[in-house]
Image (spheres, rainbow, N blue to C red):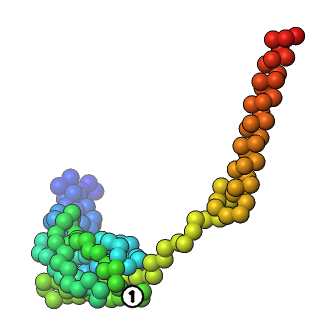
Amino acid sequence: MRIPVPAALAALALAVPVVLIDVSPARAVGVFVEVNPSTVRAGDEIGIRASCDDNLKAATVTIDPTGAIIVSPRYGFLTATARVPATTDAGDYDVDLKCPDGKTAKSTLHVVVKVEPVRGPATGGGGTAPGRAAPFLIGGGLVALAAGLALSVVATRRRRLG
């Protein structure tokens, strides 16, 4: 028995699942907020990136040391930059996002103590470092240089005479 071509195509179309493709503009992956870097020293600048269901409207991010920050739409996300005040104590601070539709998200900002080194790194003998040995080493180098010059003058005179 031979099946007509239109009937075969209709049967095949019913057997193959229909896949619907969403061609609408990109939607937010979810509601989130992040700070970059997440660990900073007091006085440093941070970048904030957030996402709500609708990334076309500004939202508010609240961080204890900096207060409320408005994150604005940019490149498909809500972004802003802020500076952690230099007087901020070391510790963990909550980062709270409040979207225009009422949804929220949380993250954490870690502030560490700002430490300034009192001296350079110990990377060698320290011959040029200030201290008791420095004058002797510099003097010895100058004496060696003078001796080398004197020997070169003597060697040059011997060639001319001999």
Residue extending furthest right?
162
What residue is rendered at 77% in x and 24% in y? 153
The spot of residue 45 in percent (x, y) is: 32, 71
What residue is rendered at 34% in x and 84% in y? 87
The spot of residue 76 in percent (x, y) is: 20, 66
Quick one: quadrant of the C terminus?
top right
Q: Which quarter of the picture shows residue 131?
A: bottom right
Q: Which quarter of the picture shows residue 47?
A: bottom left
What residue is rendered at 33% in x and 88% in y? 94
Task: Name which residue type carries label 1.
Answer: Asp
How many labels sit on residues?
1
Q: Is residue 140 above or below residue 110?
A: above
The spot of residue 53 in percent (x, y) is: 18, 78
- Residue at numbered disc 1: 89
Foreground pick, 77 / 24: 77
Q: Is residue 115 above or below residue 65?
A: above
